[in-house]
Every structure is written in structure tokens, then in C-alpha cells.
Amino acid sequence: MQEGQVDIRTPEYVSLQFQPAGLGSRAAALLIDQIILGIMNMLIVVILVFATTGDNSLFAWYRFEINSTLWGIAIIALFVLNWGYFFALEYFWGGKTVGKRLLGIRVMQENGHSITLLSCFIRNLLRIIDMLPVSYFLGMIMIFLHSKHKRLGDIVAGTIVVHERRVKGKKKEKAIEKEIRQRGLRKEDLSVEDWTLKQIGAKEWNLVKTYANRFSQLPLTERNQLSKKLADILFPKLGIDMEGMTYKELEDTLLLLYLMLVEEWEIEL
């Protein structure tokens, strides 16, 4: 089945074109991830075998009593690792695992937005079914036959795996990007944990994006008022203390927040 274009209309009524990732690219990405997981699994098992059966005196004294407990913990740890690897990376790394990143593909919502916590949980939980009867056979059949190359997890979660667009030439600098550059702001200047940043949803992102787009057009008084209102909404969600901040510091913080969010929410394809 040939990979084609899929048109998606976002909640902001913007029409976007995506190229769904087909069986070949998704299988290659999965192979890379499985190699990484295989190495990690092997290390855990080797360490556990040494700890429970080796001649190290620390373990030799009571190894028989703790063998069953350790192996039970290890089995749970291996399950969490193999499932949590995909869940954690896709949610916190913009819909990408190591394999997806190397292959230039990512998971996103069908409406064009970044993957949500619930969708990420569902699509990865259903890997258990997509893996049946062996080696992701059911998932591969689904991807090959589905018009948008979806496996069961994608269908239920409302997600799609797409190719990222390769930008050719120098990208034209936006007015807000020029403003950020002139202020000397960098993402590293704002210390916000990834988990905390995930508290920002589509509604909040639209507020930040509107603020950034209108920033240079607003008179100073209106800009100050808008900065204060937006900070009152967003900063408590992110644990940012705005007490004593000047309007300039509020602006800088909001622009840094835009800089951190734009890569995740404005997916260029």
C-alpha cells in the first residue's frame, strides 16, 4: 500500500497535510527500540542472576530466601520498563521514541495536536493486543491494510504516526522569533519540569500563541495588561512565582514559555 497524504482540519480551522508513516518506517523504528530494550533487559537479568546465584558473600548468606522475591520484583520491573519506555518517551519527547526520532516519524493526535496523556496511555496499553499472536503480527497487518497506516492502539486512542517534514533552506524568521532573539532569550532560561509543562493543554497553548502573534502589534499599556492576565492564568499551573515581577519580566517569561511550547504544539509537516 502506497503512503499518501492525509488532510486534517485542526480545531483552529487550519487545514494541514500529513504523510502517514507506513509499515517499513514504523517497523524499522520499532526494531531500533527493541534492540535498546533488549540490551536493557539483558543487563537487568544478568545483574539479577549474579546477585542471586553468584558467590558474592553479601548474597550467598541468604540468597535462597530472597530469590523468589527478587525475581518477582524483576518481572514487574521488566514489564514496567518495556511498556513504560514507549509511554514515557512518546509523552515527554513530543511523540517520539529513540527509533522514531532516528527515522523522522512521530505520534500525534488526529486533530493535529500533540499526543495527550490519555491517548498515549491507551495506544501503548493496546500494544499487548497488537503484539498478538507473535512479533506484532496483528499490528503489522493492521498498519498495512489501514488507509492511514494505523494499528489497533492508534484507532482506539485517536492517534496517527506521521513523517516529519524536512525543511529545506533557511526558514523565514517570524516577528515573535525576532523579538525573542533580540531580547537574548533561550529556552534554558526558564526552568520548568517536563511533567509540569504537560499541564498546559490546547486551550492554554492557544492563549500563548495568540499572545505571541499579537505581541509586537499591541500598545504598551494593552500589552502590559494582557501579560498580567495571561501570567495569572498560566504561572500557577507551572509553579512560577510572579510576585514582584516587572512587566518586562512577565513578558520574558511568557515568551520563553512560547519558545518551549511551540516545538511541541506547532508540528511542521
Image (cartoon, rainbow, N blue to C red):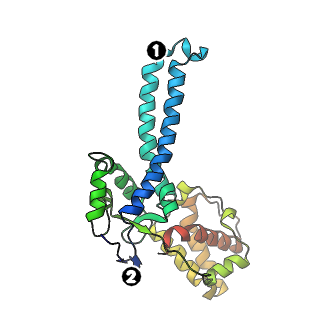
Query: In this view of the protein, which residue sits in the foreground, 31 or 172?
Result: 31
Q: Is residue 21 above or below residue 97?
A: below
x then y, percent, for residue 91: 47, 57
Left or right position of 167 against 201: right
Quadrant into which the N terminus falls: bottom left
* 10 Å crowding of disc 2: few (<14), some (14-19), many (20+): few
Q: Residue at x 65, y 84 (%)?
A: 221
The answer, for residue 91, to whether it is visible in the render is: no
Place residue 111 in its image quadrant.
Answer: bottom left
Amino acid type shown at disc 1: Glu
Left or right position of 55 against 108: right
x then y, percent, for residue 211: 56, 78
Q: Which mark is residue 13?
A: 2
- The mark closer to the camera, 1 or 2, is 1
Q: Which mark is residue 65?
A: 1
Say which element carries label 2. loop
Place residue 56 in its image quadrant.
Answer: top right
